[in-house]
Amino acid sequence: MAREIALRDALREGMSEEMRRDENVFLMGEEVAQYNGAYKVSKGMLDEFGEKRVIDTPIAELGFAGIGVGAAMNGLRPIVEFMTWNFAVLAFDQIINNAAKTLSQSAGQFKCPIVFRGPSGSAGQLAQQHSQTFESWMANCPGLKVISIVDPYDAKGLIKSAIRDDDPICFMESEMLYGYMGEVPEEEYLVPIGKARVRREGTDVTLVTYNKMVLVAEEAAKKLEAEGISAEVIDLRTIRPMDHETIINSVKKTNRIVVIDESWPFAGVSAEVAYIVQKHAFDYLDAPVIRINAADTNLPYAPTFVEAYLPNPDKVIKAVKEVMYVKR
């Protein structure tokens, strides 16, 4: 039976269920305990699990990420919360040079079952140092799995799968979506890592995206439907490993694709999707692949610039009409 809950509550349910199931799972990060989490994701978890399993850390991302990696190598399953992935830049040495390489460097003797999680991407007027999108950064590194979610159902199902996985996982959320409501079953369920979700069926064009850009794609698809254009919306959910099959099968059906990606255009997720499509579905394309990205600059603070910087439904609609060869 399903009920509507917020994304923050879905994440908390998923983590709490796994902590009840496995005493080796614990949560650590800035303000996760006494303050109930910067975004109230961990509200009430300290009361239930105690200070040994819900741990407030100093403002020292490199340090507590390293503690998490060491704990994972010794049989525990840490969940490390970053207040934002922008702050996690300080911990990249631990994530990339240690967590991602533990299995291969030890010739399979040590696993590193750890989940690094927190919000990625723009959240309004937070300016340049707090608005970056990190999915492609982390996905570039072998040994890491990267998940990026938009709704409560996927948030709960994928955080549970991530905690149970034996590989290090970067779990990307959005500050703007913690209050986003969606249906979540009361009974236990898992969402498989590495499987995209077709959120809207269509026949004329494929829209591929992830995280909060899914909502942009869905809004564009609704407006396009009113004009007689049927858009299929694919939510990647997992950036690495990426579900190539779902993308390719959709393009073979629609013969056109627009990729929407909140990150910068150079060497991003959208570039990888475009490459996969031209490699495996080139003969099915009736138009070039078009990518809609954030502007290739650092994000300014002014709200007018924020609006111009990010992908939006109007930009998506313009791109769709271009691949449909509709005159504007």
Image (cartoon, rainbow, N blue to C red):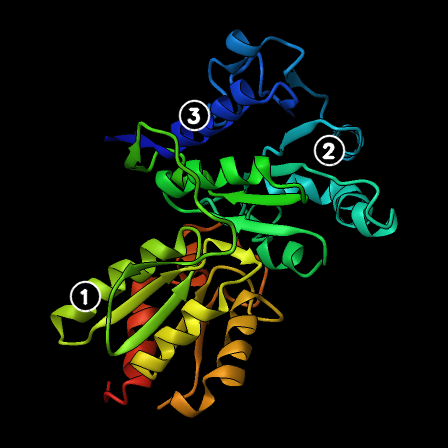
Rendering coords of residue 161 (x, y %): 52, 40
Distance from label 2 to label 3 (Cα)? Answer: 25 Å
Return the disc, 2 or 1, that comes first in the chain's sequence.
2
Q: Which residue is mark 1?
A: 223
Q: Residues within 10 Å of mark 3 (few under 14, many from 20)?
A: many
Q: Residues within 10 Å of mark 2 (few under 14, many from 20)?
A: many
Q: Amino acid at mark 3?
A: Glu
User: Where, by quadrant of the figure, is residue 140 drawn?
Assistant: bottom right
Distance from label 2 to label 1 (Cα)? Answer: 43 Å
Q: Which residue is mark 2?
A: 61
Circle number at residue 175 = none
Q: Which residue is mark 3?
A: 13
At x 25%, y 59%, the residue is: 219
Distance from label 3 to label 1 (Cα)? Answer: 35 Å
Rendering coords of residue 63 (x, y %): 79, 30
Q: Amino acid at mark 1?
A: Lys
